Image (spheres, rainbow, N blue to C red):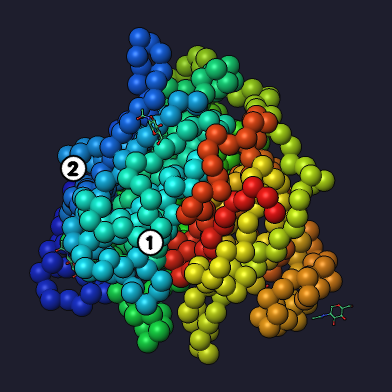
Amino acid sequence: MLMRLSALIHLLYYAMCLGFGMSEGERLLIASRLQMFVDELPLIPTVFGYQLVDGKPMPRSLTIGMFHKKWKFHQDLPATPVFAYGTSELTATVPGPTIEALHGVDTNITWQNHLPSQHILPWDPTIPTAAPANKRGVPTVVHLHGGIHEPESDGHARTWFTAGFEETGPAWTKETYHYPNKQQPGNLWYHDHAMGLTRVNLLAGLIGNYIIRQPEVEVPLGLPRGDEFDRTLLIFDRDFFVNGSIFMNTTGNNPTIHPQWQPEYFGNVIIVNGKAWPRMTVRRRKYRFRIINTSNARFFRLYFSNGLEFIHVASDSVYLEKPVITNATLLAPSEIADVVVDFSKSESSTAILANNAPYPYPSGDQVNEASSKVMKFIIKSQFEVDRYDVPDRLIKYSSPDLSSASRRRYITMFEYTTAADEPTHLYINGLSFDDPVTEMPKVGSTEVWSVINLTDDNHPLHVHLGLFTALDQTELLGEEEFKNCMVKLYDADKCNVSRYARGKKIEVPAHEKGWKNVFKIRPGYVTTMIVKFSYIHVDSSYPFDATAEPGYVYHCHILDHEDNVMMRPMKLVNDQ
Ligand SMILES: *[C@@H]1O[C@H](CO)[C@@H](O)[C@H](O)[C@H]1NC(C)=O
Ligand SMILES: *[C@@H]1O[C@H](CO)[C@@H](O)[C@H](O)[C@H]1NC(C)=O
Ligand SMILES: *[C@@H]1O[C@H](CO)[C@@H](O)[C@H](O)[C@H]1NC(C)=O
Ligand SMILES: *[C@@H]1O[C@H](CO)[C@@H](O)[C@H](O)[C@H]1NC(C)=O
Ligand SMILES: *[C@@H]1O[C@H](CO)[C@@H](O)[C@H](O)[C@H]1NC(C)=O
Ligand SMILES: *[C@@H]1O[C@H](CO)[C@@H](O)[C@H](O)[C@H]1NC(C)=O
Ligand SMILES: CC(=O)N[C@H]1CO[C@H](CO)[C@@H](O)[C@@H]1O
Ligand SMILES: [Cu+2]
């Protein structure tokens, strides 16, 4: 009876919303009207990045398209127009298929754009944006996040292309990307990276998961494995109109400067693997979850309503040396937590995976009822024998070596605002993306990067190609004085950074101490990290020319910042 009443209320609500000519804001879906935990967590289709020939894994070439189709995010929400990756329009999904590659076996992918002539979301031509001369088509380009591969296959923001490769960006080189998969096993993800359109192309659905497996190294660990016990949870937030379309504000926060751009996109509906607040029935045993935060700007501090713990086994794309147990885990956009959860420890028959991170993180609003819940686990009552476990030792890679660092760089994040304190754009080192390249690390080298946040937000920094370890986070004292100097000189040495970096030190959390590709840069602090431009699992050099054009990039992974333009080119060199 209760269920039926709530269904009736939902129906009435839709009838009201659809029935009357309301303003855009009024036609926005109120997230709390959607019932939580009614859709099952979907199984994302898998596409293998290798083929078996006589039982032996061999390289494989794939074609993956981007299609305009409709996607049901919730049983009570009308189907939503999306852009989706898939091997065909029929099989395309949001998120796209999970690509499973094998360590040491090449995967080639031809990414094909089948998108219509117009975007389904509002974008802003006043920020540096991919712009087809004929004004037709949606520029896209795919970046494999966490991948160690040649620059030509890195999805550089200026290598975009439109449907049928009709138009290509100024740095475009080729149609088929080559992923050697020779790096350490772990979690990657692929997503759009087109200049000035990354935030809208991802919001539209261009996101997918990519795993590199190395059975001879991973199976002996004895962690939960196989399709049932090893699952990826790809999380993002969205807002919708009542007709099901994705809502993105068409008015910028400074409309006279940027008609549409907003500094951060937050949605109230939390989507996991393509469904809003799904549910999953689990057995009373251990599961491995690779949790990827693919929100544009929302941080998640995840915890279980019934106190279940997270046993971290890897972070981003790299295994930890030892497992780390936590009660909560804070994920910035595009960070990955790779955890084991032991449901046999549950004292209740259900567990809600919940979120309590303020937005923007860390000083913004508290989460509301809708965005405080992620998904629900229904735990079967029967106890089981579990042959999987978490070993005391996982995988040890080369340790970061400060003494081998060839140089130090200061990377300073700036936010520029109007007199009314509304952000207009964000730069790294006071430079736009188009300013000449300043970061030219040597192939095979190790560098120290000291990242200084002079804004009010926490910015997740992502470096393409390299892997890094955060060593130290030190508070800046006299930050205003330092900032005033920096906006004049843009030079941390000349502004005597060491005189200010003398405040509180914050320990890097144990589960974030290993090699990572995204790190949360705390505002008002200097974060020092070791960046390595070589493999971490072997001594051999990259099997490709990392110095080739168009080079790589590094950027803030809040997509709205990256687009306007908290991103800089990075060019590897052989000699300095
Ligand atoms: C993949 O691409 C590389 C270089 O681009 C090429 O040498 C190789 O033959 C390709 N492999 C397959 C399976 O097509
Ligand atoms: C849904 O509603 C929004 C807001 O009124 C409108 O812009 C959009 O075109 C509609 N979408 C569809 C598919 O009708
Ligand atoms: C869109 O953004 C503008 C400018 O920040 C704001 O005034 C307006 O309320 C927003 N609209 C909605 C529906 O959130
Ligand atoms: C996901 O990343 C966004 C953007 O960095 C961040 O704001 C949000 O809190 C993260 N969510 C989770 C669950 O980690
Ligand atoms: C998790 O929380 C419980 C109860 O508050 C506490 O006893 C335990 O020590 C915590 N575990 C960790 C790893 O912080
Ligand atoms: C930095 O320190 C030097 C030496 O103490 C001093 O001469 C200089 O004025 C300082 N610069 C700033 C911007 O504080
Ligand atoms: C949240 C936070 O501490 N943000 C800081 C980022 O850095 C700027 C400048 O150093 C500080 O003013 C902010 O408080
Ligand atoms: Cu940022």
User: Dot 2 surroundings within 10 Å: few (below 14), some, or many (20 or more)?
Assistant: some
Residue plotted at (60% across, 24% down): 390
Q: Is mark 2 within 8 Å of ligand 2?
A: no
Residue 516 visible in the snapshot: yes
Judging by the rendered image, the residue that carries numbered circle 1 is 170
User: Dot 1 surroundings within 10 Å: few (below 14), some, or many (20 or more)?
Assistant: few
Residue at the top extreme?
54
Residue at disc 1, secondary structure = loop
The three-letter code of the residue at mark 2 reads Glu
Is residue 428 found left or right of 50 in the rendered image?
right
Residue plotted at (57% across, 57% down): 570
Measured as percent of width and height from the top left, residue 472 is found at 75, 54
Residue at disc 2, secondary structure = loop
Residue 375 visible in the snapshot: no
* Of 345 and 93, the residue lying toward us: 93
Residue at the left extreme?
19
* Of 79 and 60, the residue lying toward us: 60
Looking at the rendering, the quadrant in which ligand 7 lies is: bottom right
**With respect to residue 230, does 571 lie above or below?**
below
The three-letter code of the residue at mark 1 reads Pro
Measured as percent of width and height from the top left, residue 84 is found at 26, 48
Residues at circles 2 and 1 in contact by the CB criterion of under 8 Å: no
**With respect to residue 566, does 516 lie above or below?**
above
Residue mark closest to the camera, 2 vs 1 = 1
